[in-house]
Amino acid sequence: MRPGSICVQAMNKIETSPERPIPDRGSADKRLPHEEPAGERPAVQVDRLTKAYGPVRAVDGISFDLYPGETVALLGGNGAGKTTTLSMILGLLKPSSGSVTVLGHDMSSRPIAALSRMNFASPYVDLPQRLTIAEMLLIYTKLYGIRKGRRRVEETLERFDLVALRDRPLGKLSAGQKTRAGLAKAHINEPDVLVLDEPTASLDPDTGDRIRGDLETTAKVGGAAILLASHNMDEVMRLADRVLMMRAGRIVDEGAPRELVDRHGRRDLEEVFLAIARDQTGHEHRETPDGEKA
Ligand code: ATP
């Protein structure tokens, strides 16, 4: 995904809002995929979402729900429609048809209310080059209307191991350090919905591992719903409760990572990915409730 100024655009839509109480998320448990928690409303509802550019259907009628505490990964080859999907979920791109509802707010008509409780990170998005990490985080606390913003900045610097780099301008960070700064920014408002594009790209294995641990905490302890686009299959195996396999704008298969591997009779998720990406038949691979292929 190369969303350009996706993050800045999203931030521009956010107005200062009073800080809402932090929900008690201590009871968020890991759920089985597809298990819809009784009485719990999805954090994100995507319904027959379509984006057409002339004859090109970048996204072609996809539907899925994402629940609090759940991590869902979008997998698909180049041009499968992942970026377009994430952009519509963030309210940056108007769907041709279909709808996105985030935390009960329709993203076409009420994006501001949802965006104040969402956040986004991508290593491909440029952060303000001249600001130091601490300055950038403080500005975001003001944009999100966070009371005791300085304290939140200190906690966030600590959490993302950025204390020693706090006064370094973003333009002078290594690629991995920038990625960490972007993830810190993405957590500054303790979002209920976190959209991440390749969150650990350019991180060394140790830092990547620690960030993945952090993201597990964000979802499983913090209760955030995470939508993740990643090409790192080990990362998807570790983080995702559910995988949506996309091809040519459609969801052609879905399931828990291990379930997909077993169902396709493959050794690992990478083999499943290759099989689906290279399938020229256009068939979907999803199973109907009675076990038949869709
Ligand atoms: P990648 O992994 O390469 O980033 P992706 O899955 O994110 O790919 P998208 O960027 O969503 O894919 O693109 C999906 C399809 O829509 C592609 O065929 C792309 O060429 C097309 N597309 C995207 N934006 C536009 C646009 N503004 N005008 C025309 N076609 C577009």
Image: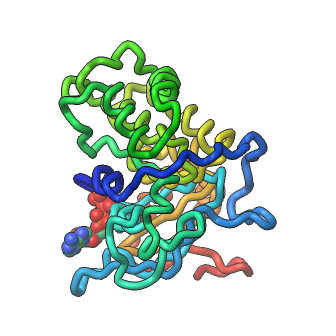
Say left or right for 256 vs 37. left
Quarter of image, res 84: bottom left
Task: Residue at 75%, 40% (x, y): give it.
Answer: 26
Reply above or below: 77 against 289: above
Instruction: Report the residue that reaches farthest toward the right.
Output: 38
Reply above or below: 241 against 282: above
| Nearer to us in this view, 91 or 211 | 91
Visible in this render: residue 2?
no
Q: Horizontal and vertical percent for residue 174?
A: 25, 25
Q: Quadrant of the N terminus?
A: bottom left
Can you tell me which quadrant of the image ligand 1 is in?
bottom left
Render colour scheme:
rainbow
| Nearer to us in this view, 200 or 274 | 200
Q: Horizontal and vertical percent for residue 10?
A: 35, 56
Task: Residue at 59%, 56% (x, y): give it.
Answer: 261
Reply above or below: 287 against 114: below
Task: Residue at 61%, 79% (x, y): give it.
Answer: 293
Visible in this render: residue 110?
yes
Q: Horizontal and vertical percent for residue 182?
A: 36, 37
Q: Horizontal and vertical percent for residue 96?
A: 35, 83
